[in-house]
Image (spheres, rainbow, N blue to C red):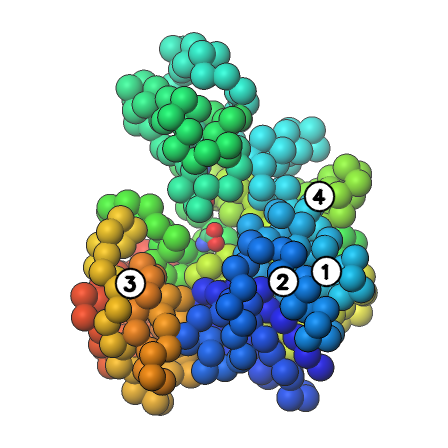
Amino acid sequence: MKIAVIGGGGREHAIIKKLREYKEPLQIVAIPGNGGIALDAECVAIDAKNIPEIVSFCVDAKIDYAIVAPDDPLVLGCVDALEEKGIPCFGPRANAAIIEGSKVFSKNLMKKYGIPTASYETFDNKDSALLYLESAEFPIVIKADGLALGKGVIIAENKGEARDAVISIMEDKKFGASGDHIVIEEFLTGVEVSVLAFTDGKTVKPMISSMDHKRAGDNDTGLNTGGMGTIAPNPYYTDEVADRCMKEIFLPTIDAMNKEGRTFKGCLYFGLMITEKGPKVIEYNCRFGDPETQVVLPLLESDLLTIMKAVTEERLDEVEVKNSDKAACCVIMASAGYPVKYEKGFDIDIPADVLPDVYVAGAKLKENKLITSGGRVLGVTAVADTLKQAVKDAYEKVDQIYFKNMYFRHDIGEKALKILEK
Ligand code: AMP
Ligand code: GLY
């Protein structure tokens, strides 16, 4: 079987490594992949947003099944375009990917169907947004409507910061057309949990819960990043919280999308805040999270491709999604200066016995050697019986890896371990 995986980060590397556990050998092509993925699959240099080229490549290469992993191609209709050519896919069609592609859409969906989320208002012009801020309470959260490379969310501590955010998004167009509409919403307090769930539009089967560490610096200081490390399971996601999430959020979301004529098939990511009043949705993503995938898939005991195909064929109820009772930790090794400015092009040394646990996010292959090519460079994952051991093992692996100007957080998992020790 010939499989195409669209995307080129650590998440896609984790998906491909997991696919390799399939009972038969698979021919896997990554589009565009990266230097690390090239060690595990063939890579084809087509931009993940170039839908026409992806489609013509997949047709010519006689791809049997495509997995579309990143948000951009999903929102741009990559699945629709491949399906039109008769290639079955894993991932939502564009009309369902809008759940991530438009925050105005997702907030209105939640309001209409009573799914718990922060209270909010939407705006399509700057002046009414600024007027609203005059009588608002702070902190407050300002979100550009569309995709903004994960940077379209601003938490404003006071009126001045909030006004600056509105002006930069709506007037200066910091995120382009993504800022034509904005959401201004209530600031929620609590703990964040990520849940990635398979769904075929009828059945929802969650994978293990996880916790991202979004800030660049130790103890949650510094700028927001794409994610500096993850652990799973998330100790705040108790059985009781999980039950509530299934009843109050997961199933109602799937029903709501069906009622809107936008059946969601693929991996739906629930970014949740566990507040004093119960779980609320912070955001939906229409895809596997990154770097959540790098801890969630290593803890998935069932076969990934079998589940994905069941999702595509709308028979998820027939397959098992079994999560391990072990724990995992992924530490992201980045280039110093990320997420702002950083140098690239440095040799990466990884001992051969550590390589299987490394998910490459930003590296190229040059004369068969990995060299840094991005802000986030590697994700290093360990699985163990306890979270404490997984964290220790992940950092032991990190200590064996070297590249110039490498940077990583030293406290991935600490918050979770404190909860477990209570
Ligand atoms: P997002 O890009 O939607 O993942 O948002 C980035 C981060 O902003 C989230 O992971 C939260 O930490 C934070 N955030 C977003 N919305 C809220 C909210 N309403 N209240 C508090 N924090 C939020
Ligand atoms: N880790 C959050 C995301 O994938 O957007």
Element on which disc 2 rests: helix
Residue type at mark 4: give it.
Asn
For mark 4, what is the residue? 95
Q: In which quadrant of the rendered image does the N terminus lie?
A: bottom right
Q: Give left or right: position of 68 versus 60.
A: left
**Residue 367: quadrant of the picture:** bottom left
Give me the C-alpha separation between circle 4 and circle 3: 34 Å
- x 36%, y 85%: residue: 368
Element on which disc 3 rests: strand
2 and 1 marks in contact (CB < 8 Å): yes
For mark 1, what is the residue? 82
Circle nearer the viewer, 2 or 3: 2
- x 30%, y 69%: residue: 372
For mark 2, what is the residue? 54
Visible residue check, residue 410: no
Q: Earlier in the sequence, mark 3 or mark 1?
A: 1
Task: Tell me the crowding category of disc 3: few under 14, some 14 to 19, or many 20 or more residues within 10 angstroms, Cα based.
Answer: many
3 and 1 marks in contact (CB < 8 Å): no
Percent across and percent down for residue 333 are 30, 66
User: Foreground residue, 231 or 400?
Assistant: 400
- x 58%, y 55%: residue: 50
Percent across and percent down for residue 400 are 24, 81
